[in-house]
Image: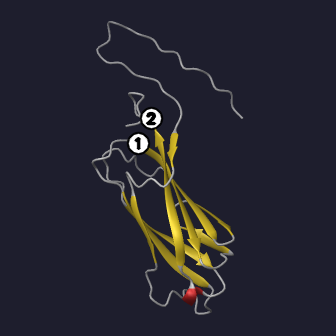
Amino acid sequence: MKNYERPMILEVEEMAEGIYANSGVVDYDNDTECWTWDVYFPDLNKNKNGAGTQCDVRIKAEHPTTVHHISAKQTITITFNQTITGGWFDSGSFSADGTTVTLVRELMADAYKSGDNFDVGLTVDCADSVNLSVVGSTFACTHAPNVQGNFD
């Protein structure tokens, strides 16, 4: 673990602009204030490999341009009605624990007034892809400070 070193702040009167130092991030769980999201199946039969054990899932998320903060990463947690034995996420890290899948999408573009919208793919391995369904999902956003040292 790295040791934290407090940044030095210097005030120079002769300079027209200043730079503010700040460290740390804030996690917002189930961040419905700045994100809307949907987890859906793009193919009605949901059977990717013909054997019924893989399923394609899409995650569509939108960040409005009216929300002003920097988003360092998003963590999407999806609960399915079946045990997920493996999978692959095309936009970040993937982990499965029983019926719960956790996806982490590191900063792709800061969400500060950018409308950082995305529609990404996920492939999951399960016993019966035809009957696979989503029980629930959450979306967590990690806010990072802006250059003024503020979060919003």
Q: Position of residue 5 (x, y in %)?
A: 62, 22
Image check: 25 left or right of 4? left
Whether tag 2 and tag 1 are in contact, CB under 8 A, the answer is yes
Image check: 36 left or right of 8? left
Q: Quadrant of residue 18?
A: top left
Q: Position of residue 22 (x, y in %)?
A: 48, 27
Furthest-bottom residue in this view? 50
* Residue 11 to residue 52: above or below: above
Q: Quadrant of residue 1?
A: top right
* First in residue order: circle 2 vs circle 1: 1
* Residue 126 to residue 149: above or below: below
Q: CA distance from mark 2 to mark 1?
A: 7 Å
Density class for disc 2 (Cα within 10 Å; few <14, some 14-19, many ≥20) is some
Image check: 16 left or right of 120? left
Is residue 121 or residue 40 the one in the foreground?
Answer: 40
Furthest-top residue in this view? 13
* Residue under numbered circle 2: 145
The amino acid type, in three-letter code, at marker 1 is: Ile
Q: Position of residue 118 (x, y in %)?
A: 39, 62
The amino acid type, in three-letter code, at marker 2 is: Pro
* Residue under numbered circle 1: 70
Q: How many marks?
A: 2
Q: Residue at x 52, y 69 (%)?
A: 136
